[in-house]
Image (spheres, grey):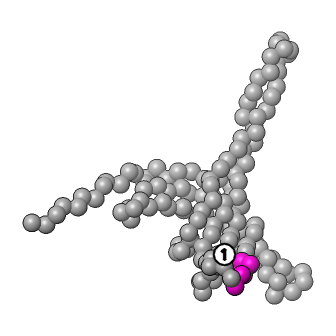
Amino acid sequence: YVAGVSKVGALKRTTDVVEHRTGGDPSTVLKSPGQTKYDAITLERGVTHDKDFEAWANKVWNHGTGLGSEVSLKDFRKDLIIEVYNEAGQLALAYKVFRCWPSEYQAFPELDASGNAIAIQTLKLENEGWVRDTEVGEPTEPSFAEQA
């Protein structure tokens, strides 16, 4: 569980179109689905003392390990669940994202002393697919009755 994520990139997949024709009908092109690709997902959060993003990114590359032992690919892939909550704080939607790993990590943004922006960390996650969690149903709306 990573708290404080303020922005999650879109979940997008693209399936290639494979065009072919049959020998008996040389003038008609038929189309079939080909390989499916899943776009990387970007997570953003304000810079904190929490080291989860950095520790995960360092599994793919860690400068301090020395030449020849740059990476430790042991358990660098993780399955994630992206949860969306409504304004009442109820779980409204969830997606399971499979075999994620960090391909890009921005530990610290460009600083501007004259600006008033919050420092944001960014983690770009490659993934091998996602599905909607169908066990998460539509939440019941809370009722707010006035007390007499």
Q: Is residue 75 above or below residue 10?
A: below
Residue at 79% from the left image edge and 32% from the top image edge: 18
Relative to 84, is 137 on the left or the right? left
- Quadrant assignment, res 9: bottom right
Where is 104 relative to 58, above or below? Answer: above
Q: Which residues are magenta?
A: 107-113
- Residue labelled with disc 1: 121
Tell me if mark 1 has few (under 14), some (14-19) or many (20+) residues whose alpha carbon lies within 10 angstroms of its own: some
Residue 8 rendering spot, x and y as whole percentages: 60, 62
Number of disc labels:
1
Residue 72 image point, x, y percent? 77, 77
Residue at (80%, 28%) from the top-left corner?
19
User: Which image quarter is the C terminus in?
Assistant: bottom left
The correct choice, above or below, for 121 with respect to 28 in the image is: below
Residue occupying the point 72% across, 81% down = 111
Q: Main secondary structure of the magenta part?
A: loop
30 left or right, relative to 129: right
> Disc 1 on helix, strand or loop?
strand
Residue 43 lies in quadrant: bottom right
Please state which amino acid type lies under the numbered disc 1: Gln
Percent x, y of residue 140: 31, 54
- Asked if residue 91 shows in the view, the reply is no
